[in-house]
Amino acid sequence: MYHVCQHPLIKIKLPLMRDENCSMAAFRDYLQEITYLLAAESLSQIPLQELPTPVQSPTGASANAFTLARPVVFIPILRAGLGMIEPFMHLLPDAQVGYLAMSRDERTLKAENYYVALPKVDNPIAFIIDPMLATGGSIIKAIKELKTQGYKDIRVVSLVAAMEGINAIEKVFPSTDILVAALDDHLNEKGYIIPGLGDAGDRLFGGK
Ligand code: PRP
Ligand code: URA
């Protein structure tokens, strides 16, 4: 199940990121701004429970208060996923953060893990965060890793996706919730999203 976020600000800001003349600093800022919108939408369905004690307002009246019903874990895929983590943590500071570091071999387009650190929590809702969903190989590998470590409720948030990658994920994990800011036209022969925005990790942090 994939969904393309329809917020109009994305339609203004994403082309600014795609622009080859966008500076690294501006690229990071736009990614954060769009991620606030994606985070708000992806977190809009999380279950809550009411706190036993209401809050007392200065008016003398009380009001109900709420907290998360289940733990939430954000998992950015390094490097590029790091560019999206701050807005998620800002909106939900009680969430835990796991790290999955992966690199896509430019020749085979296969993703390889080089660091895995996932929180051990009971019955979490996990959000895998990565701006680029191209062949889907990195996300599929990430979901497999999470499932190996006992995670069951796994959702994906991405900036730009290609249909090829979404289809690949849905083939292996049919019920995965995927939220993206844009669905682009196709992948080129090097596995880059077209029109896309180039190498997201390089544009955020510089070339390797
Ligand atoms: C990019 C991107 C994704 C992956 C997407 O990472 O951030 O993780 O490629 O491609 P896929 O859907 O075909 O797997 P990259 O390997 O360039 O590493 P980086 O983030 O360190 O630059
Ligand atoms: N990774 C990127 O950073 N960009 C793409 O277009 C595809 C994979």
Image (cartoon, rainbow, N blue to C red):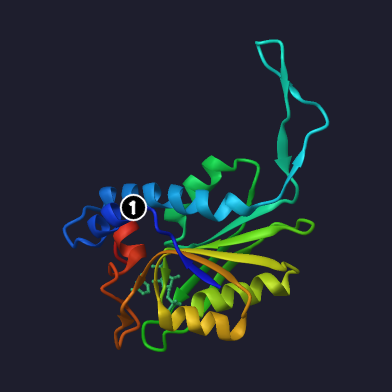
Q: Quadrant of ligand 2?
A: bottom left
Image quarter of the C terminus: bottom left
Say above or below: 18 vs 24.
below
Which residue does the image show at 29% across and 84% down from the upper left? 188
* Towards the viewer: 197 or 52: 52
* Towards the viewer: 30 or 37: 37
Provide the residue designation for mark 1: 8
Say above or below: 7 vs 156.
above
Residue 153 in percent (x, y) is at: 69, 65
Q: Secondary structure at mark 1?
A: helix
33 to the left or right of 2: left
Image quarter of the N terminus: bottom right
Say above or below: 141 vs 91.
below
Say above or below: 153 vs 57.
below
Residue 136 visible in the displayed image: no
Q: Amino acid at mark 1?
A: Pro
Question: Which residue reaches farthest left?
Answer: 21
Which residue does the image show at 64% across and 55% down from the upper left? 73
* Towards the viewer: 76 or 34: 34
